[in-house]
Image (spheres, rainbow, N blue to C red):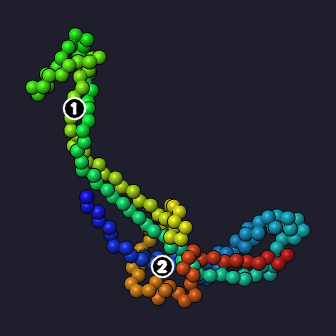
Amino acid sequence: MEIAIATQRILLFSDQFSAEDVKQNAWDKKTSAFDAVSKVTSFLSRPKDEDFELVYHEHRFQPFWHVIANARYIYDRSAHYQVQTKGPEVQAVTLEKTDYTVTNGHIHISVVEHCRQEEHDEVVVDGVTGKSAPELKAYLSMTPTVVTGALESHVPKGSILRATTNASFCHHA
């Protein structure tokens, strides 16, 4: 048996949006973030921009594993084939100088099967929880940078090496 394992490496994907674009997107969606509160209070008055305050934001990274496995199995195995005869009158069959007795309209032949089986599997797994994360596969179409040395030296200072860019708002009602 031969097993080959590819070199493990860390790939870093560049930000797809600037911090300002993310903050603006969050600000634009602030009302829908408090949708239940907005629906109740909209009868009285519509929330204004000054009713909201950005109280926290961070730049985080989401680690994940992209695993591709290929397997090729080449092997022989013993098997028994059942071959139907052409009619009830057939009592025996000679095949390759071997005589076979007919049982219930069939002959039974011992053979060796020469097999080749190939399998392929590809998974994306959350690097923290270990759970399948197929939604992260979208990142694979982007062009990453190979990290050499410490990962921390390749990310902006103050970044959190765990999840995605996040923003929190506080609604002052």
Comparing 135 with 38, the one in front is: 135
Residue placed under numbered mark 2 in the picture: 14
Identify the image quadrant of the C terminus: bottom right
Q: Residue at x 30, y 51 (%)?
A: 118
Identify the residue under disc 1.
110
Q: Which quadrant holds residue 107?
A: top left
- Circle 2: element type: loop
Q: Amino acid at mark 1?
A: Ser
The mark tally for this picture is 2
Q: Is residue 129 left or right of residue 168?
A: left
| Quadrant location, the N terminus | bottom left
Q: Residue at x 20, y 13 (%)?
A: 90
Residue 94 picture location, percent across and down = 13, 22
**Label located before the other in sequence (2 or 1):** 2
Q: Check whether the beta carbons of the residues at disc 2 and disc 1 lie within 8 A of each other.
A: no
Q: Residues within 10 Å of mark 1 (few under 14, many from 20)?
A: few
Task: Tell me the amino acid under the disc marked 2.
Answer: Ser
Position of residue 145 measured from the top left corner of the image (x, y, whole percent)? 41, 79
Q: Residue at x 55, y 67 (%)?
A: 129
Q: Where is 80 relative to 130, above or below? A: above
Alpha-carbon span between mark 2 and mark 1: 60 Å
Q: Nearer the viewer, residue 130 or 160?
A: 130
Q: Quadrant of residue 65?
A: bottom left
**2 or 1: mark nearer the eye:** 1
For the residue pair 99 and 151, the one nearer the viewer reads as 99
* Residue appearing at x 24%, y 26% in the figure: 108
